[in-house]
Structures are given as structure tokens and as C-alpha cells.
Image: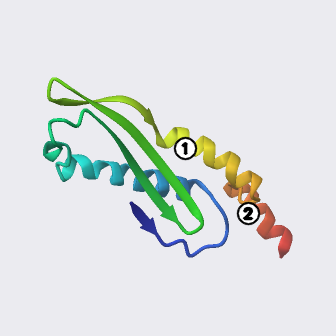
């Protein structure tokens, strides 16, 4: 799990999207860098892994299901950062937290001045 501070209240943009995706990737990489798969008992043939990242009110998730085949872990299915970004866009829009482009932000800023 990865947690980032989100000091701006400006909303959800490309920077937030890439930080969440980076955090979920780093969280999933722990399995490889910390060699969790190597210490699994032989009787374990399937495992589910999750990478979760928080950025203020925003959350990103990646997941994969692995099967042990002839002693090696093979990805059976996965839920990628791209899949989760599609879900986040819909969810944040329904909550009024939709992602804004830089042009929209600049326009809103100039309209308020």
C-alpha cells in the first residue's frame, strides 16, 4: 500500500492519475522485490495480489491473480492501472470530483479574476 499527501484541493488531474498508478505499481512490485512468492508453502497454488495507493481523497487499485505452474508463478488475470483509471473517472465524476484539463482550470481561474 502506498499513501501520498494531496495538498491541493483543485481536483483530479493527470498528475494525480500518474501518482496513483505509480503507487499501485510500486505496491505490486513488493512481491517481486521482497520475494514473497519464494516463501509461499508448496501447497499454495493460487494467490491474489493487490496494489493500493491513496492520494488525499483519491484511491487507486491494481490486482492480479497468479497460479503456480511447474514451480513458477504465472499471471492468470489482472486488473491494471488503466482499468482502474476508467473506473475512477466514472466514480469521481459522479461525486463531483471529475478530472479537469489544464485548459478548464485556466479558464475557471481567469473567469474568477
- Residue pictured at 40% horizontal, 62% vertical: 2
Q: Is residue 59 above or below residue 110?
A: above
SS class of the residue under badge 1? helix
- Residue pictured at 76% horizontal, 52% vertical: 94
Q: Is residue 66 above or below residue 59?
A: above
In the rendered structure, the answer to whether residue 56 lies left or right of residue 11 reads left
Mark 2, residue position: 106
- Earlier residue among tags 1 and 2: 1
Q: Residue furthest front?
A: 43
Q: Nearer the viewer, mark 1 or mark 2?
A: 1
- Label at residue 4: none
- Residue pictured at 49% horizontal, 63% vertical: 54
- Residue pictured at 37% horizontal, 35% vertical: 65
SS class of the residue under badge 2? helix
Q: Quadrant of residue 70?
A: top left
Residue 113 in picture, x, y percent from top left: 83, 76
Mark 1, residue position: 84
Q: Residue furthest top?
A: 70
Amino acid at each position: 500500500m502506498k499513501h501520498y499527501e494531496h495538498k491541493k484541493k483543485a481536483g483530479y488531474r493527470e498528475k494525480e492519475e500518474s501518482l496513483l498508478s505509480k503507487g499501485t505499481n510500486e505496491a505490486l512490485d513488493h512481491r517481486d522485490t521482497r520475494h514473497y512468492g519464494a516463501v509461499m508453502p508448496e501447497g499454495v497454488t493460487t494467490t491474489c495480489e493487490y496494489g493500493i495507493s491513496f492520494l488525499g481523497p483519491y484511491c487507486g487499485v491494481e490486482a492480479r491473480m497468479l497460479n503456480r505452474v511447474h514451480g513458477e508463478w504465472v499471471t492468470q488475470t489482472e486488473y491494471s492501472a488503466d482499468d482502474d483509471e476508467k473506473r475512477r473517472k466514472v466514480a469521481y465524476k459522479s461525486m463531483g470530483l471529475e478530472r479537469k484539463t489544464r485548459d478548464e482550470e485556466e479558464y475557471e481561474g481567469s473567469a474568477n479574476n
